[in-house]
Image (spheres, rainbow, N blue to C red):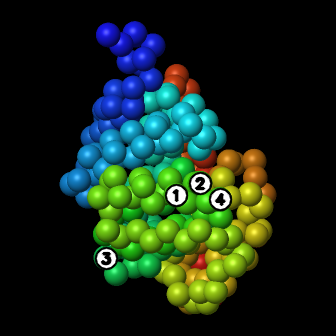
């Protein structure tokens, strides 16, 4: 018989709890994600838990509320993209090419790929995390994801992408410099960040809030268009 602590750390139970919390959020924004999104996120949460308990994949991989926070935060560009007046409107449609830099535990790359038919290339230089991304994408049944196990600075993809994303990338200036090099003309770079971070003057700041445990976290999307 499993002890209660074993049940609390069981990936299946954690994944179910993450799915419930994410679905509760999705009820407030209907028709934003694909029909299979909840199933895919449950699979992601289970894989994050299994790998996270063995390696430093993300903080608190056994905490369903923490994983749900990362999923919901990752979804915010999709929420904005549903508004016809937003700069992000239409950015996640089929045939769009999207690059996610420093993909790590799959936030936001795998979450956005689970929510949209656009094609995603996830770049992650750390081999173990790149391996995790391969396994997670397979577990989620995603056919619109390519994993590149290399550093973002090594990319030789001039003017190829419609959209570039990153979350917890490091220096915002470095992110935008790489993004401007690989984006098509008119393409967008989106950096998830905290309001206190500094950005290049050209970046538009879009504030939002995400529930985390008993509080709300202030976040921003810093967006810059490639001229």
Question: Going from the N terminus, do you reach mark 4 or mark 3 first?
Answer: 3
Left or right? Give the position of 27 relative to 135: left
Q: CA distance from mark 3 to mark 2?
A: 30 Å
Q: Does the residue at mark 4 contact the one at mark 1 (Cβ under 8 Å)? A: no
Residue ID for mark 2: 128
Q: How many marks?
A: 4
Left or right? Give the position of 71 relative to 196: left
Question: Going from the N terminus, do you reach mark 3 or mark 2 first?
Answer: 3
Residue under the image location 23 percent in, 53 percent down: 36
CA neighbours of label 2 inside 10 A, class few (<14), some (14 to 19), many (20+): some
Question: Going from the N terminus, do you reach mark 3 or mark 1 first?
Answer: 3
Residue ID for mark 1: 131
Q: Secondary structure at mark 2?
A: helix
Residue 160 rendering spot, x and y as whole percentages: 53, 87
Q: CA distance from mark 2 to mark 4?
A: 6 Å
Question: Going from the N terminus, do you reach mark 4 or mark 1 first?
Answer: 4
Q: Considering only vertical position in the picture, is 37 above or below 45?
A: below
Q: Does the residue at mark 2 contact the one at mark 4 (Cβ under 8 Å)? A: yes
Please tell me the numbered disc located at residue 150.
Answer: none
- Asked whether residue 195 appears in the rendered view, the answer is yes
CA neighbours of label 4 inside 10 A, class few (<14), some (14 to 19), many (20+): some
Q: Considering only vertical position in the picture, is 160 above or below 207?
A: below
Residue under the image location 54 percent in, 33 percent down: 53
Closer to the camera: disc 3 or disc 2? 2
Residue under the image location 68 percent in, 70 percent down: 151
Residue 98 rendering spot, x and y as whole percentages: 47, 74
Residue ID for mark 4: 126
Residue ID for mark 3: 94
Instruction: Give the quadrant of the N terminus.
Output: top left
Residue under the image location 69 percent in, 48 percent down: 195
CA neighbours of label 1 inside 10 A, class few (<14), some (14 to 19), many (20+): few
Closer to the camera: disc 3 or disc 1? 1
């Amino acid at each position: 018989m499993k002890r209660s602590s074993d049940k609390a750390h069981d990936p299946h139970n954690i994944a179910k709890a993450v799915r419930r919390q994410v679905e509760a959020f999705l009820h407030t924004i209907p028709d934003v994600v694909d029909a299979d999104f909840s199933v895919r996120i449950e699979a992601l949460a289970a894989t994050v838990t299994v790998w996270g308990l063995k390696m430093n994949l993300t903080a608190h991989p056994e905490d369903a509320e923490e994983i749900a926070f990362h999923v919901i935060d990752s979804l915010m560009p999709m929420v904005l993209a549903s508004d016809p007046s937003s700069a992000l409107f239409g950015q996640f449609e089929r045939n769009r090419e999207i690059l996610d830099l420093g993909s790590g535990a799959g936030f936001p790359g795998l979450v956005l790929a689970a929510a949209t038919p656009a094609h995603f290339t996830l770049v992650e230089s750390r081999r173990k995390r790149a391996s995790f991304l391969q396994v997670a994408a397979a577990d989620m049944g995603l056919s619109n994801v390519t994993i590149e196990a290399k550093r973002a600075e090594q990319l030789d993809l001039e003017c190829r992408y419609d959209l570039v994303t990153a979350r917890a990338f490091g220096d915002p200036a470095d992110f935008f410099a790489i993004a401007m090099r690989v984006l098509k003309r008119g393409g967008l770079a989106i950096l998830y960040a905290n309001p206190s971070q500094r950005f290049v003057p050209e970046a538009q700041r879009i504030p939002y809030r995400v529930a985390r445990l008993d509080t709300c976290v202030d976040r921003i999307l810093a967006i810059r268009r490639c001229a």
